[in-house]
Image (tube, rainbow, N blue to C red):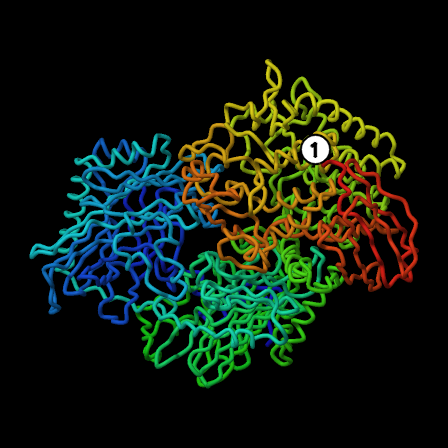
Amino acid sequence: MTAHTPEAQGEQTQWDSQSNPQWNSWGKSIEHDFAMHAGDLDVEFTPFGDPRSIRVNDIQILQYQPGVHDAAISGLWLRRKRGDDITSIALTGTYFGEDAKAAPRFTCSEQCAQWSGENLGVRWSVTLSPVSDESQALKEITGNGCSWVWNVKVVPAGSETLEPNDTWELVTAQDIALAPVEQALTSEPYISQYVAFHEETLEGPGCVVSARQTMSDAPQLPLLVSTICEGTAAYLTDGFDFFGHQARLGSAPLALSDENWHGGHIDQYEFAMVCLLSKGRQLGEDGIEWNQLVAFNPDYRGEMAEVSKKLADSAILEHAQTVGKATNVTVQQSMNQSEPTKSAIPSLLATARGLNADVLSDEQLRSLVSGSIVSPEYGRNSSLLSFFSADGTHVVSRTKELAVARSHGQVLLSGGDFDPEHPVLASTSYAPGVFASHIVLGNTNMNRLVSVQRNALNLLRSEGVRVLVRFEGEWRVLQLPSAFIMHLGGSRWVYRIGDMVLNVTTTASADSNALDIRFTSSTPIDAMLTVDVEEPRQWYARHEEHGVIFAPAWDSEVFKQYPGLSYAFVSENAQCGSDEVLFANPKDDTKVVSAEAPQHSGIFTFSIKGQRELHLSIAASIRGAQEACDCAERLISSPLDTTKVLQKHNARIASFADDLHVNGEGRLSEFNILIPWFVQNALVHFLSPHGLEQYSGAAWGTRDVLQGPLEMELGFGHFAGAREILLKVFAHQNSDGSLPQWFMFDAYSSMYQKDSHGDIPVWPLMAMGEYLSASEDYDILKQTEPFLDDDGKASVVQHLERILSYIEHHRVSGTKLFSYGNGDWDDTLQPAQASMKKNMASSWTIALLHQASLVLASQLKKAGLSDLAGKFVAEAATIEAAFPKDFILDDVIAGYVNFTDEGPQPIIHPTDTRTGLKYRLIPMTRSIISGLLTPEQAKGHLKLIDENLHYPDGVRLMNKPARFADGVPRYFKRAEQAANVGREIGLMYTHAHIRYSEALATLGKDSFVSELLRISPVGQFSRLSSSEIRQRNCYFASSDADFPDRYEAARDWDRLRADAKDPVGVRGGWRVYSSGPGIYLRQLVQHVFGLQIEANGLVIDPVLAREDDGTSISVNLFGAERTVRYHVLDDDSAVTVQINGSTIDGSYQQLPYRQGGLVINAEQLEDATDIEVTVGSKRCTIA
């Protein structure tokens, strides 16, 4: 396949206009042809009547924007109850039934839209129209916004018999964003976390639901309030409740078959919706009519209860009913006088039934891997849910996938380059038939080609790479497999359907930026693989003989930075085409409805007929299309040996982790499974910053990269990698000494957030001190690097001096303490009042600065920079003098101190009556780690943590969440704005628990290992009874208390306690993208196994419990394989080491709370094969 690239031809026209015209039409929009515009209200539809977008000015009402290949998430349904039987039909959009004749007919004009159809013995019509003449009472609700009405009219019709006792109900569901368009599409789960819901049950309309967006970076507070005027019986506020996990099977929404929704409830999770169930009604000759009123205010700051009551005003409801009825009549008359509108045949991706695999027996699941299984997980009926193989491969059953809230997924990295200067190809796979998504080379925001899978319930089936097969005469979409298998370098889906077995494998090349997708069938079959390009207008596409090549459009930002970026999709045996084959009769794809089907949407296809295999090779390059094509074709001509490629991924990860392996079957053997997966997760965070929920990333957070990636590099002794991280960070420093909160580390380096939280300048000091301590690479201090906003270069020493100068110029007035600024590590506690930035100090940041100053000063002195070292020593001395006086009150460290004319005022402290919060974790743990506390103070604060902050699933950031008043902040932004009890709001942030574990290691507490294991996803299910079922081979950024909303969490917080009579469950938070895996790995290497690798030696300082006696590990140290055995005594014995049977002499580290580890030099390890370490488990000097 020869690529005629734009660069080679010299003219843009040679690339696009001479290509197959099917690809060029991607630049045209088809969805906007179906829209209504009424004042500030703009509603766009797909050609099949699915609401695609509802906007009021720049505020996006809907959370998702389905395309022409998706069924809508929002919609209206009619339910008929006949005895115990409930039957429902869709009134709007893409029809999910098998009878195409029953699909709604859709028409649209500038002022209204209508759907109509006939089924269940009734004829219905639905109209959507604005309320153009709002009353004064309604205007008090909408302010500068607007309102609209959904009118539903149902009358008897057809031959089907209606029974007099039938009850009819209306179901409405609308996903909610209420955010500016560019924010609404960044991360739907995040947007949902800030939609606060309120419900009032009132006389007349019944349930009235209001929703308000409270994001901290939104200057307005958009509000939506809705009810069914004729009476609302129940409501739901989250799509997980409305659709249910069964949606992954392609099933109808769960709520449609639920009799009464139990009256409804508020659930503040990650799929914000307003779902309403009308009161049941009997159908007479005159029919039934419903009107759902939706009112929107772009900035409402009053009480949500009050606005709900206002909407229940009878005059408002009657006016809405009048508007709805009048519009319905007008549209009906217009339709009767015109030709019927033909309905286009929707895409197979939207309408084809899902093909779900059979459930496998335990024996069949075990047979999917060779050798014995490790760490099996069983369900309530003792069936096997998941397990690992000896090499870390993770196997998940269909049953478990259907049970988890967060669908099993993984981010794959191609190639084997761990240098961030070289872009890597990444792809994301999910269990329910998402065989690849978010395919991107390099920058995960700007460069991505294949679309992101945005919905956890798999409701938008166009996204990513999908497979359809012809099964029993009709096209079906592969959805839930019998088993989903995750390797470090690939994913595999096994579909056993009766006697037929289908396999799909997605394998990342271990040597190049390429991806191999292979579909196989045990019998000949017709199959179609679809690929969705997320932003087709940004790409030129050229259809070649065996595939298609993509290059960035000349007017795109991608082309400006990476003009040679190219993606190639090549298949030797499949026919490559556009999406027109998806707009066919589902049972006879020769009848393509070309005149009505909207084609060329950004999806392209690869098809086979009567074959057993479909093979697609994907490759990418920043050096032009030809290189990408050559790479892809090599994978076709010389197919990957999947087994060898996966083994190579395993070996590369193991080598990065110094081939660390725990021998035997003790509790520490769990780390054998955890280490490779956490290394892989940490590399994703470092090289391709994004995660499964947080798919927008692309940048390095200054604070994050100087923790996770850098600490992992130091932990495994990769000093060159740590050095490059430091230099890249300094090259992005502002000339005033501050650093950006985040920055793009590639060709998009002009994109960054200049201002930052107050702690950010401290991290380069801390990181440089730790790097120099381990590497003794003092030459780095002479290295010159530029500043972001200045053309000049400066040595690293001068960069450090600029940071110190910045700190000195940002003191709290009247003190010598570094001010709080825009926040600290806890993003939820950003100050809501501007004065807090200058008058307040964070005790955590101050403790961190103390530690960083001392660590760096000691190394600067060794480098001969005594003057600069002295300045940092003075900074630490200032903190040591002020800390017990200003920050510790009544023997408790305050979370913050606000310095006023009346003196220091503690915030988050037992004496703090304003916030009501008493204890904050991270100042306590960081003060212990930094050695800032006396032994007695450390003992006291450890007791406070145990009594007030320690829970079965880990330690929490505060003793309870901040106050919540429908999202309106008083002291802190996100802490008082987010409605969801998750991430930092739920307070159990895994990163902070790792630092708590580090504090235990600093003290020498034998509970250290237990606390690291507490947060290991591999075995958490067996240790924590309140743990809700979740994925086991990835890092979770938080453990989220399963409270439905902030108010119940505040009322019942003690249900999280170990002794709770009615314990609340905890669920896994966001996955993969975090500095946590790297930090965890360093604690594992340096403190559990006590191997602190330095350039010229080793500090051996394990912190183990008595039960770990006899542990043995294999590890590569200084280029040679060693065996280390640990003998743990029940006393306070210092570390002693024997090498090959001889006792080794060495010096001991000086630590503040216990005797340190043994320092030995590299020469003493030269011939070592067996290292015996003896240590006491009670070295902690504080009881």
Residue of label 1: 938
Which residue: 33% across, 80% down?
588
Secondary element under disc 1, as helix, strand or loop, is helix
Q: Quadrant of residue 138?
A: top left
Taking the image as shown, residue 649 lies to the left or right of residue 357, namely: right
Camera sees residue 884: yes
Query: Of residues 39 and 916, which is closer to you in this image?
Result: 916
Q: In this picture, is 705 found above or below 420?
A: above
Which residue: 70% across, 63% down?
653
Q: In this picture, is 1172 found above or below 807?
A: below
Query: Of residues 865 and 939, which is closer to you in this image?
Result: 939
Taking the image as shown, residue 587 lies to the left or right of residue 910, namely: left
Camera sees residue 182: no
Query: Of residues 186 and 880, which is closer to you in this image?
Result: 880
Quick one: label 1, few (<14), some, or many (20+) residues within 10 Å? many
Taking the image as shown, residue 668 lies to the left or right of residue 535, namely: right
Q: What is the x, y in percent for residue 304?
A: 33, 34
Q: Amino acid at mark 1?
A: Ala
Q: Quadrant of residue 358?
A: bottom left
Which residue: 18% across, 47% down?
324
Q: What is the x, y in percent for residue 956?
A: 57, 40
Q: Quadrant of residue 800?
A: top right
